[in-house]
Image (cartoon, grey):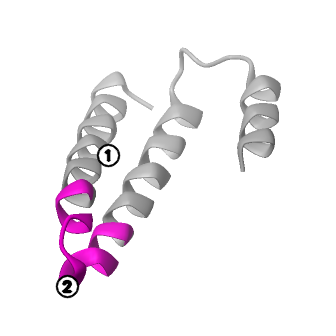
């Protein structure tokens, strides 16, 4: 996967995290804010896994399992 796509995914995830924080600050928009946060984290995880600079997938899996 090209570096440009990975960078775009990280930017999209960052925007979704910001929207998540904005959504969680109001009760009416909390569900949508939570969804934005989930989507942002999913995009960030997929982008990290497909990043060519990541070579130690065993460590990534161990950290993902231990963290959640």
Q: Which badge, 2 or 1, comes first in the chain's sequence?
A: 1
Looking at the rendering, the stretch of residues picked out in magenta corresponds to 21-34
The secondary structure type at the circle numbered 2 is helix
Give the vertical position of 19 relative to 13 (above or below): below
Q: Which residue bears the numbered disc 1?
A: 13
Task: Indicate yes or no whether the magenta region holds residue 29.
Answer: yes
Give the vertical position of 39 relative to 56 (above or below): below
Name the image quarter holding the N terminus.
Answer: top left
Q: CA distance from mark 2 to mark 1?
A: 22 Å
49 to the left or right of 8 = right
The front one of 3 and 18 is 18
Tally the numbered discs.
2
Q: Residue at x 21, y 67 (%)?
A: 23
Q: Residue at x 17, y 59 (%)?
A: 22
Q: Position of residue 5 (x, y in %)?
A: 31, 35
Q: Are marks 2 and 1 in contact (CB under 8 Å)?
A: no
The front one of 49 and 25 is 25
Q: Nearer the viewer, mark 2 or mark 1?
A: 2
Q: Position of residue 8 (x, y in %)?
A: 25, 37
63 to the left or right of 48 = right
How crowded is the residue under tag 1: few (<14 C-alpha within 10 Å), some, or many (20+)? many
Q: Quadrant of residue 6?
A: top left
Magenta stretch, main secondary structure class: helix
Residue that extends furthest to the bottom in the rendered view of this protein? 28
The secondary structure type at the circle numbered 1 is helix
Which numbered tag is attached to residue 28? Answer: 2
């Amino acid at each position: 996967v090209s570096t440009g796509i990975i960078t775009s995914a990280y930017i999209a995830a960052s925007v979704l995290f910001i929207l998540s924080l904005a959504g969680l600050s109001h009760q009416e928009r909390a569900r949508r804010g939570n969804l934005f946060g989930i989507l942002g984290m999913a995009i960030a995880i997929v982008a990290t896994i497909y990043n060519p600079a990541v070579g130690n997938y065993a460590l990534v899996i161990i950290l993902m399992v231990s963290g959640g």
